[in-house]
Amino acid sequence: MEQPMTDDPAIAGVAGIPADTPAGTHAPVQSRQRMRDGTELLLRTWQPDPARFAEPLGSVLLVHGLAEHAGRYQHVADVLCGLGLRVRAHDLRGHGASGGARMVADHPDAYLDDLAEIYDAAVPGWNELPILLGHSMGGLIAARFATARVRPVRALVLSSPALALRLSGPMLALHRVLLLAPRLRVPNPIDARLLSHDPAVVAAYRSDPLVQTTITASVLESFIRGMAQAQADAALLEAPTLMLVGGADRVVDPAGSRSFFDKAPPELREAVWFEHGYHEIFNEAQPLRGEVFAALTGWLQRHLQQ
């Protein structure tokens, strides 16, 4: 059940938005939705300017990445709202301001199941299929959602999706050991310096109190199983798909995106590679960030006209 709530001052302003991004003009409405297991997830919903758009031209469900939260996507929501789209994003369970044990996935498809519940609560009121946009781990979740045909989507956008990881031998050995204690938290291996070439983004990420600094074997297990399944099911895609990939990404392995793209139906797939881009391409230093948003908006505008 979705419950509206007033803006939480403890959450507002903690976004890790690039320093040269203009202040958001589309303030989100925050609410909470209770999952079937009782866990409450924080939702943010952005609406396009009603003076420009009497009705939204479409809807987006946005899924953020590992360890972060949806508040870091204000600038992305502004761009999407500027196209006439409404946007809803939730903090994943165990992330940000949502409930749940920190960085714990009780089963490999926990995040997928939550997204299905978010979808089921939103779509009847929207009366249209949503565009699904996911970044990093959110890209993996979105890819799994679409390829498993959990629910139909209008289109799929994957930003630096976690479709392959560079897992060293010691990391795999540690994973096997940690599976004996899947809820035990260990330091998050993400190096903030590899997220963006923009030092302000790196500093904001490091100082953001809602960014998680640990990870558990249960989350890593959801990655490993989910990546294999997404790759196996890539040919089952039914929605137009755009992939935006940083060629210099060292957080996830871009080879996973190439493999997924090669298996996806040719008539539905499109990819834009930013050879020098780090992992958070929506947060990259200019002018690359502008090029990423131009690719995103151009593709969306073409598909909104169909």
Image (cartoon, grey):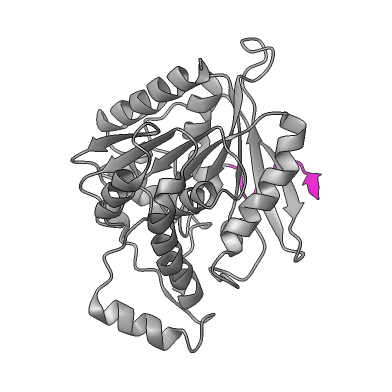
Residue at 35 percent across and 23 percent down: it is 294
Residue at 40 percent across and 61 percent down: it is 227
Picture coordinates of residue 118 (x, y %)? Answer: 68, 48
Picture coordinates of residue 256 (x, y %)? Answer: 30, 54
Position of residue 304 relative to residue 59, above or below, is above
Picture coordinates of residue 211 (x, y %)? Answer: 48, 58
User: Could one spot residue 59 in this view of the protein?
Assistant: yes
Residue at 64 percent across and 26 percent down: it is 47
The quadrant holding residue 186 is bottom left
23 or 267, which is in the foreground?
267
Instruction: Say whether residue 84 is left or right of residue 291.
Output: right
Q: Main secondary structure of the magenta part?
A: loop
Residue at 67 percent across and 29 percent down: it is 128
166 or 10, which is in the foreground?
166
Which span is picked out in magenta? 1-12
In the image, residue 10 lies in the stretch drawn in magenta: yes
